[in-house]
Image (cartoon, rainbow, N blue to C red):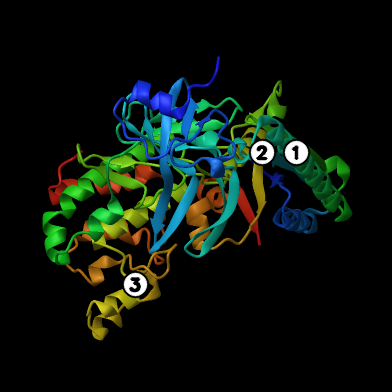
Amino acid sequence: MPKESVAALVARLRPGYRLARAGRVVDDTGQFMDIIQGDVLRLAGRHYLVFKDAVERRFGYTDPKFWVKKCLELETGARAIVKLVFQESFPLRVGTVSTTCFRSPAKEARVLDVVRGDARFMQGFATRDTAGNLVRVIETVSGVSIENTVAALDMPHADYFRDLFPNLLARFTGACRAIAWLHSQGELHGDVGRDHLWIEHKTAAMRWIDFDYAYEAYENPFGMDLSGLGDILVFLAGQGVHTIAGMRESGLPESLLDTLAPDDFSLVHGNRLANLAKISPYIPERLNRILLHFAAASDVLYESVDELLADLTPVVQEMGGGLI
Amino acid sequence: MDPKKMLIAVDASENAQRAAEYAARIVGATPGFSLTLLTLERPPERDLYKDDAAHRAACQAREGEMRAAQGAIKAVLVAGGVPAGMISAHYVASCKSPQAEGADQCSLGQSIALEILDFAKAQGCGTVVVGRRGVSKAEEFLFGSVSSKIVHNAKNCTVWVIS
């Protein structure tokens, strides 16, 4: 039976849809660089019209992800992200520490199974194309990352901290609980960061995305996730990252900057202030003590997300953010 | 727990070799001591490999490397004057390894440190000897440290951490 053309598929499944380009129907997704706008991916009996490659914007530069396709599912009209197989390993620098990171389709497929139906995580399914490539079909999270949410706020920190932070902290604590639960299932997120925690427009829920990073096993396999949670907490409490240069630029007096010691900065990211009470003295001591667990000065390091949660939960109650 | 029953944790690192050299210098051929070499297999993670065949090959290579390291450590002890009869060696395969099927005992791999302490307790070893990698505090936070965790969790035994 001849393959139905892209034009015929669109006419049958999305009548009236204006196709910018009619490409080819792709069953073997191995050559992902050749898959472009207007092609249709045929996966698990469904058809995904490719719009474009996804891009990641980090630290002011744009990084195209040729193996991640933004698509339209022709059967339903829903937007979807299709992640094709790209096995790579690369050195990952986390602050002062380097490790080797692996992009693992199998790991992400497994995590998608584990979190199915749990709105705290992105949803999707994995399937194999005709060549056996493990492709992941992800439901689009319509929202904004925590990073961009906070970056878009134009208000003094004291106002932010009083009016917005308590609720953000409560919801972030819920997101931490989600990661603790994932760990209890024997899985790790792998890339916990403020660009991978999104606030959904429709529900205002925080949802974790992107689970494909994997690492060699270590004595504490969940340490990277825990460190990522600490970074986000410091970021949220501070309404951004505070480096010496940034603080100087924002007009903090030199006399205050002179009081900052290396021990006040993040253990992992030595240029980011963790002891935020030094520049924002209204930060409750109980919260600042948690931040200090992620500072270079800390003698007691968290070993699990549960330990972090045990400290965070009373702070959320104290600040009146409500428990979510 | 008998302090003269010593457990030496062995992997394929130079730290383990240093630990063995130190133990040999202290113990030598002194009667009454026994040295137990414990190797807990830690296979490469399945997620890091394209398919099962590649993972199996990597597991085999890792096992070969760790068994060879255990043999080398035993040789270090003997060369250091410890009679071979005072040394016993245990290799515990990982439960995750494809090679572990049918094994009497396997390592869960959730915490090498706690498994070493459990093994020491089961064998009545009163002294645990480990090498230290010398990781930074940041690395310890991100990845953990076997020797630190042993020190923090050891009960009713002495721990030698060899730098």
Q: Callout 3: helix, strand or loop? A: loop
Residue, disc 3: A243
Residue, disc 1: B63
Labels 3, 2: one chain: no
Q: Residue drawn 33% across and 65% down?
A: A274
- CA gap between label 1 and label 3 equals 46 Å
Q: Is residue A228 above or below residue A209?
A: below
In percent of width and height, residue A87 lies at 59, 42
Q: Chain of mark 2?
A: B
Q: Are marks 1 and 3 in contact (CB under 8 Å)?
A: no
Q: Are marks 2 and 1 in contact (CB under 8 Å)?
A: yes
The quadrant in which residue B19 appears is bottom right
Residue at the limit of the structure toward the bottom, as seen here: A255
Q: Callout 2: helix, strand or loop? A: loop
In percent of width and height, residue A78 lies at 31, 30
Sooner in the amino-acid sequence: mark 2 or mark 1: 2
Which of the image's four quarters has the N terminus of chain A?
A: top right
Q: Nearer the viewer, residue A204 or A224?
A: A204
Q: Which amino acid type corresponds to the residue marked 3 in the rendered image?
A: Thr
Q: Which amino acid type corresponds to the residue marked 1 in the rendered image?
A: Glu
Residue A247 seen in render: yes
- CA gap between label 2 and label 1 equals 7 Å
Q: Nearer the viewer, residue A317 or A83?
A: A83
In percent of width and height, residue B70 lies at 78, 44
Q: Which is in the foreground here, disc 3 or disc 2?
A: 3
